[in-house]
Image (cartoon, helix red, strand yellow):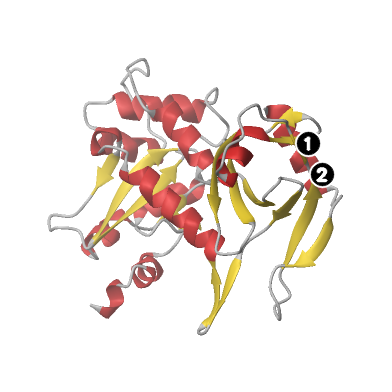
Amino acid sequence: MLNITHEVELMMRQRRFVTLPLLTPSSMLACLLTASLLPSAAQADDVADRLAESLSVNGQSMPVEAVTETPMDGVYHVRLENGESFYSNADGSHFLVGDLYENAPDGLVNLTEQEQNQERADALSAVPESELVIFRGADEPKATVTVFTDPTCPYCARLHDTIPELNERGIAVHYMAFPRAGMGSQAATTLQQVWCSDNRSEAMTQAKEGEAISSAADCDNPVAGQYDLGKALGVQGTPAIILPNGQLVPGFVPPERLSAMLGLDDE
């Protein structure tokens, strides 16, 4: 699976594809790749099922997680197990790599982004609060953001310093772990110590301030799972803020701007 994904990524980097416009009159382009379809013993009636079962590149089965229909006739959205996605025709002989837009009366609508946002929102809603480090104010929050964080990240510490103001504005923060250097890093160990602490929020603040945490890192904790989830959801760095609608906002965002993005300034 990893070799297949790597090969597709390499082909994309080297631009060994033909581009064509996704929409007219816009100038957005997508990548055209050729692929082959493995023979399938079962003749499935549903095209999406056939693609999910038999899609391949260079004779090797692709790690397909899901295939769904799109508003375009004969075009299907393929999502791989590593979170990457592309579009395919019905027989898997051509791929489109890029975003799919609807040319709506009010302007262009990024359907790919909409679907990705919904997938993120659904995935995060399935994470129990017991596996999060939560900072909320005394009152019921008006909005909640999920933040993938790393204690060695300077901008994560800067964001953490704004939490009192965020809470005052009615914004709750749900922290999830994302050690940028991987599970073998010191950041991963520190995050595990945070999750193993009796008071996670206090331990998280200590970690952000560079203080030592007394708790061990050997308890049953969700750090590795959250790291994998973050990668699957498109997180590439920290802090990574995910809004209630699933939109991914990379990097530090000042409280006033985040409040505006959440529509709280209108209240």
- From the viewer's perspective, tell me whether residue 16 is left or right of residue 57: right
Nearer the observer, 168 or 246:
246
How many C-alpha atoms fall within 10 Å of the one at disc 1: few (<14), some, or many (≥20)?
few
Nearer the observer, 119 or 47:
47
Mark 2 is on which residue type? Met
Quick one: quadrant of the N terminus? Answer: top right
Determine whether label 2 and label 1 are within 8 Å by CB: yes
Residue 82 seen anywhere in this rendered image of the structure: no
**Which residue is denoted by mark 1 in the rendering?**
7
Q: Taking 106 as reference, is 81 above or below it?
A: above
Nearer the observer, 204 or 228:
228
Mark 1 is on which residue type? Glu
Q: Taking 13 as reference, is 164 above or below it?
A: below
- From the viewer's perspective, tell me whether residue 131 is left or right of residue 16: left
**Which residue is denoted by mark 2 in the rendering?**
11
Q: Position of residue 6 (x, y in %)?
A: 74, 35
Q: Taking 34 as reference, is 195 above or below it?
A: above
Indicate the secondary structure of the residue bearing disc 1: helix
Q: Position of residue 209 (x, y in %)?
A: 39, 40
- From the viewer's perspective, tell me whether residue 50 is left or right of residue 174: right
